[in-house]
Structures are given as C-alpha cells and as structure tokens.
Amino acid sequence: MRNDALGLFWRDEPPIKRTAAPKGKRTPPAPTWLSPDHLPGLAEATAFNVPMFTDDELILLGNGSRPGHMVFDIEIYKNYFLAAFKHVETGKVCYVESDLIGTIFLSKLQFILEKFTTIGFNSNGFDLPICAMALNGKTIDQMKEAVRRIIEVGENYREVLKSYKVKQPKGYNHIDLMEVAPLRASLKIYAGRMHAPRMQDLPFHPDTHLSVDQVTITRFYCINDLNNTLLMYNMLSQQLQLRMELGQQYNQDLRSKSDAQIAEYVISAEVAKLNGERATRPTITPGTAYRFKTPDYLNLFHSPLMQQALATVQNSMFIVADHGSIEMPAEVKELKITIGQTTYKMGIGGLHSTESRIAHVVGDDEKLYDVDAASFYPYIIMNQGLFPGHLGPNFLRVYKQLVDRRLAAKALGAKHKKEGDKVAAAYWNLIANSLKIVINGSYGKLGSKYSNLYAPDLLVQVTMSGQLSLLLLIEWLELNGIRVVSANTDGIVIKPRTNQIDAMNNIIKQWESVSHFEMEANEYKGLYSRDVNSYIAVKPDGTVKTKGAFANPWSNQDERSGWLSVNPSAQICVEAVEKLLTTGTPVAQTVRNCSDITKFVSVRAVKGGAVHVTEKSAPPPHKTKEELIQLAGYEPYFGGLWKFPDQEGMSCVSTDSAYDNAMKLLMVPAVSQYLGKAVRWYYATNQTGEMVYALSGNTVPKSTGAKPLMDLPTEGFPGDVDWDWYINEAEKQLAQIGYV
C-alpha cells in the first residue's frame, strides 16, 4: 500500500516532506526612527563638548606658513546645509552652516577650502561638488536635487554640475580617501573595521525638514563622522606617503587614486612620452575571441593527463564578454586535474587546489614548504615580451624600467638596513613600495574596458601561462614522488620527506631555468585548511600566516591599514585557535583571559538598516490555533498538517509547529532601536531581543544572541559576554580546518 493511502483509497498528492516550519513573511518594525519626536542623543548633542576654533584663530592659522590639514564632511537636508571641518594637527573643529532662511557664510567656506589641505571620503564625487554649488550661489533646494541625482539616480557629478552651469573648482589641496582604502565599503563599515569608538548612522532620513533640535543632533553626528575620517586618514598614512613619493617622481597629484588608477596613469603617461602621443583606449567588441599562445617550455609536460589538459587550453577560444573581460571557456573551467593526491581547477583568477577540512602536520621525516613565484605576473609579461597592441613595444620598455627600479631600490633598502642606516633604508623601501603599486596595479587594468591599459588578450596570456607553469612544476615534483598538497594563484605547498629535499630543490631549479621565474620558500610545521582560500599556517618559530575566514589583521598593531580589508567577526575565536595550534593553550583559556572587547565584536553591513527589537506586542486576537495559523498564511493540507501555498517541495508541519511559527510571524515589534546600515555587536548572555532588517522584519544573519555595541565602552569590560558562545565557535573553527 502507498505510504499516503487513506483506507482503501489514496489522494493524488506528492509525498509529504516533513521539514522545519517555513519562514513566511514577518511583520517589519514600526519606523519610529522616522517620527518627528525621534531625537537620538539630543542631550549629548546639546552639550556639544567639542573644542572649537574662533574665527580669529582660524584666520591666523589659515594665513600662516603651515595651516595644516582639515578632515571634512557635509550634510544636506531640505532646509539645512552643513560643512564641518576638524583640524588634524590640533583637533579643533569649525563649521559652516545655513541659517533659518538658507543663507550660508560662503567666504568662510571658501577660505577653508583654499587655505588648508582638506581630506574627505567620497569627497571628490560628492562633498566638493555640493560645496561648488554652494559657492556658486545655488539654493539648498538646488543642492538637494543635485544630491538626489548623484546618490539615487547615479548620475556623474560632472554632468550634474554642468546642468547647473557650475564648474568644479580646481587648485584645492585635497585628498579623497575612498579610492586609497582597500575593497570599496562605506565609511560606517570602515569605522567598524577600525574599531572606531562610535558607529553612528545618519540620524534622520535625508528628506527630513529638520527641526531646531534635529539640526543640533545632525551637527554633532557630522562631527563624529569627522572623527572616523581622521581615524582612516591616520591608518592610511603609509599608503598616502607612497602616493606622495610617486607624485613627486611623476609630477602629478596621486594621493586620491587607487593602486590600479596610479598604475594606469604612470604607465600610460610614460608610454605616451616615448610614443609622442597619448594612446586612446581601445574598443574591443564583445564576442572577440583569443587563443592562448603556448610558451615553448610548456611543451615539457610528461604525463598524458597534463598533455591533454594543455591541448584543451590550446584548443579553447577565450571570448570577450559584454562586461569587457574574458569568460573562461567551459571546457577549461570544467577541468579537474588530479595529480598525486591533490585536485586542481583553473580559472581567470588563477590556479586553485580543491582541498577542504584538511590538516597537514609534519612528521619526524617530513617538511612542509610554501613556495611562491616572486613577481609572478610581471615576470610573465617581461619573459614573454607582452604588451597591449595599442600602446606598442614601448609599454614593455616602461614596464621593465619600473621593475628594474623597484628591484634596485629594494636592494638598496636591504643594504642600508644591514649597515644600520635606518633613515636611508626607510627612504629606499619607500621608493620600492611606491613602484610596487604601479607594477602590481597594472595587471588588474588589463581586463577593464574603461582603462587605457585594456588588453584582454594579455589577460588570457598572463593568467593561463601562470596556471600552466605551476602545473608543470607540480607534475615534475609528483612524478618524482614528491607530494604537493596545495596550490593558489602564484605558489604551491610541498610536503617532501626529508630525504627528498635535495631532489625537490633540484627540480625547482630546473623549472626556474626553463620558465625564468624565481621562487621564494617559507617553511611551515603545520597547515590547517578550511579550503584553499581560508587557512592557518604555523611556521617553525611559532608565528602564523592566516588567510580568508581566519585572517586576523588586527593582531598586527604595526600595519593597521590591513584592518580596513575585512569586517571583524569575533576575532578572539581565531586568536584562540592560533594559540592552541602554536602553544597548545586551550581555547577556553584564551577566550576567558581576554579583556579586550574589540576582539569579541562582529561588524556587518545590513541592507536597508538594522533594528534592535527588545519587546513585541501580542499577536492578533484569535479563538483557536487554526485561526491564527491561517492568518499567518498557512493552508490546510491533510492529516492535520499545514503548508504554505508558495512553498516548494510541499513542506508540511504539524498544527503545533505552524502555531508557534505563526506567533513569531504575527507578533509586531513594539519597542525597537534603529541601528543603521552598519552594525556592531557582541554575543551576550540572556539576550531576549533580536536584530532584524528594518524593511522586512527578518532576522539579521548570525545575530541570534547578539547585543548591539555601536559605542565601545570607555572603561571596563561588559559583564554579560557569552563566553560559551565564543568557546564553541572556536571549537567549530578547529573542526573546519581539520584539527578535530
């Protein structure tokens, strides 16, 4: 009899799949933060305990020989304009704002912009254009409309200014930090990554007509944003110094440009000098196809497996997609190359092995080496004599000069360091690192159709040459019984027996001689991998190299710019795992002995904003469970079960489960606090509230048990930290890396 039979008959329904209750559609919290009486932090804002410039002090400083730097930000509402500034050197603040009838003290605004080095975030594309409109006598309504067009519509600020017959002022001494910072994010998220004392979102909707109290709060909020901009400026000091050094070399202001933008400018400008004209950006039609041109040494594969893999690459067509970059051919993308005990996959981003949840720990007769190719992509370009067709061979000439200059500066830096001359060593290291920006930044522009360096054929040639070169080395090692356990972009991890080390070194030397790469080796005593992009490697001296989910840049207090690259996520757990792997310290001991709350916090961007709900009202009145279940959107199935009509797989639940879920869905959030689009929290005991999306009411991922911490404590350590949560999370991470 069928398992859905009812007596002698059955219903023609699909088999029942019993699952957890469907999520359904939750009720979003009431937007109390949009109410006119919502006045967050009014008492603190009214007190306005901020060191201020007098006008006389400002004039005296601005007209002096060393006026200094001002971080700045603007706010614009329907009835209010504000430009706030904070002096980097003294910490004093000044601001220019509109009065009740919309008048702005323009001479003061112009004085500050002209006399000081100003620093902003997204200021070239937003703050300065709006200031230009103000200085050209445009009304607040006109400026507000311009903001709408730039932010909401996405129009280029130049076109917006042009429509108002306003020219962007030139000659300001200005730095925009947005392009300098890694991995594009909001200032709020960067603030969380930097462990800023305060994370605060815009207190009122941008379309609000501000009251007097709301103006007071907005002014104070803006000055907090200045603090976060200043914090970022200090964190990026080294990157800005490199850009100033490059700017002096090439007589250009490069302070507000990304690595890739700098590379594009320097290389295209130098090539233009040699060619006698600036090359125009090439137009390459989507659908254009390229073949990989095989360097001679890649015909040295021995195994039928790799000979076939090479043939697959050689016979493939690499096609330019609509977005301008190269689509990896399906036949290449689908290749799974197993050599020895390790499987590798190829892609536009480079060669990757496919390991997961695996630990490699050296035994008594084993070693573990991470072997990387130095300047991998630059050497491919130079070794093969590659250059964009529209730039000509002079590209290669300029590129080689940059590489040679960097290597010479790097050598001089090492020489002076050895001799004890710290000043000279620092200078030459600065030169070397600034040139590294240009060399490495250029590769990313090969696949950008908006770049003067655009050359998708070179992108194919470089990336495929790199991957096949590593596979050649892997094959040679494995054919000689030397195990390779991992590969990632420009290097491999080798696990030889001690009696194989000489053979390994000889094979690497032979490979270097035919490929013309130079390899650099680091020894590990353990490699613990969740996957190829997330791992912890332990070196013989007890230090660690981490990547991906286990990256912990906050452990490096000397190189804080690395903090800007990733959101903190309970970093104490990673630290506990590291200490267990390096010193044997139990994870519980590391967690419980830590009193730095920044190691316990997590930071997350929340689309539409997050709300912390602490209380909920009762569900709608109902006489029976079934009545509430149907109000929540369930439909009766059979056998006392319930389902959502739009739920795939006919997922069904019991009456009790459906009722419990209906209670959750229909309970309206009553007491809530709007947190913003960037949130920071730690996991606490006895947390009864929840963090939800403002627009949907759905729970923010990974926020169960989370307590908002938008302001870091000025002293002390929270007494409600959920130690067990962090210990359990560290133990989960140990399992993920194959330790357990």
Image (spheres, helix red, strand yellow):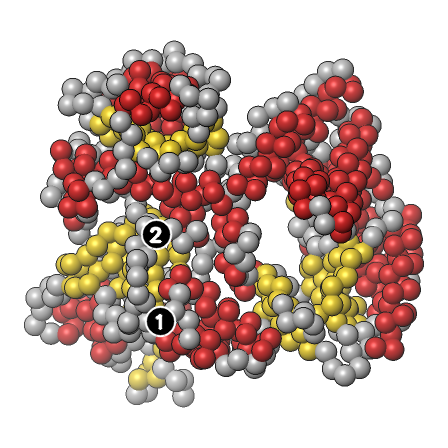
Amino acid bearing label 1: Ser
Q: Give the residue at x 27% y 52%.
A: 675
Residue pictured at 69% horizontal, 23% vertical: 269
Relative to residue 510, is residue 236 drawn left or right? Answer: left
- The CA distance from mark 1 to mark 2 is 46 Å
Disc 1 target residue: 651
Marks 2 and 1: in contact by CB < 8 Å?
no
Q: Is 365 situated left or right of 239 in this image?
A: right
**Could you tell me which residue is drawn at 67 percent across and 25 percent down?**
250
Above or below residue 436? Residue 685 is below
Locate residue 85: give its quadrant: top left
Give the residue at mark 2: 197
- Mark 1 or mark 2: whose residue is earlier in sequence: 2
- Taking the image as drawn, is residue 205 in sight? no
Check the image and report above or below for 14 versus 149: below
Specify the quadrant that holds the N terminus.
Answer: bottom left
Q: In this rendering, is residue 47 above or below 637? A: above
Quadrant for the C terminus in the image: bottom right
In the rendered image, which quarter is residue 319 located in?
top right
Q: Where 152 sits versus 685, above or below? A: above
Q: Nearer the viewer, residue 735 or 436?
A: 436
Residue 188: image tag: none
